[in-house]
Amino acid sequence: MQIIKLLKTKENKYEVILLNKDLIELCDKETFQDLYTLNFYLQSMQKKLNFYESLVIIHDKFNNKVELIKNNGEIFIE
């Protein structure tokens, strides 16, 4: 299982950190301006790193809330 940590900033930017099950970073931290490019990046990394089970942690700093999503299959963030 891979862990995807998303940080949504007040400027509506998304910072992404991909971690494996041992909490070791798989890639450098990336920043995206919109959900379209974020979803494209996540789906391409999913195929590149060959994982289908993931835990997505979304931390929304603007609304001060955290959401956990367990995903089996293709990743899509709304």
Image: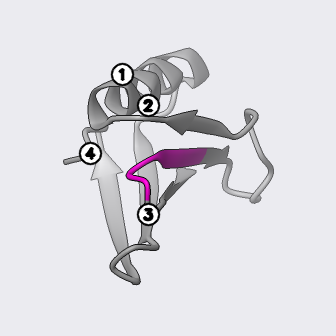
Are the residues at dot 2 and dot 4 in contact (C-beta closer than 8 Å)? yes
Give the class, few, some or many, for how many residues have Cα within 10 Å of label 1's Cα (few <14, many ≥20): few
Numbered range of the magenta stretch: 11-16
Are the residues at dot 3 and dot 2 in contact (C-beta closer than 8 Å)? no
Amino acid carrying mark 3 in the image: Lys
Q: Label 1, on which residue?
A: 40
Mark 1 or mark 3, which is nearer the start of the sequence? 3
Mark 1 or mark 4, which is nearer the start of the sequence? 1
Give the class, few, some or many, for how many residues have Cα within 10 Å of label 3's Cα (few <14, many ≥20): few
Mark 4 or mark 2, which is nearer the start of the sequence? 2
Mark 2 or mark 3, which is nearer the start of the sequence? 3
Q: Distance between the residues labelled 3 and 2?
A: 21 Å
Q: Label 3, on which residue?
A: 10
Tell me where residue 38 sits by quadrant: top left
Q: Residue 42 carries which label?
A: 2
Give the class, few, some or many, for how many residues have Cα within 10 Å of label 2's Cα (few <14, many ≥20): some
Q: Which residue is drawn at 44% across and 50% down?
A: 54
Q: What element carries label 3?
A: loop
Q: What element carries label 2?
A: helix
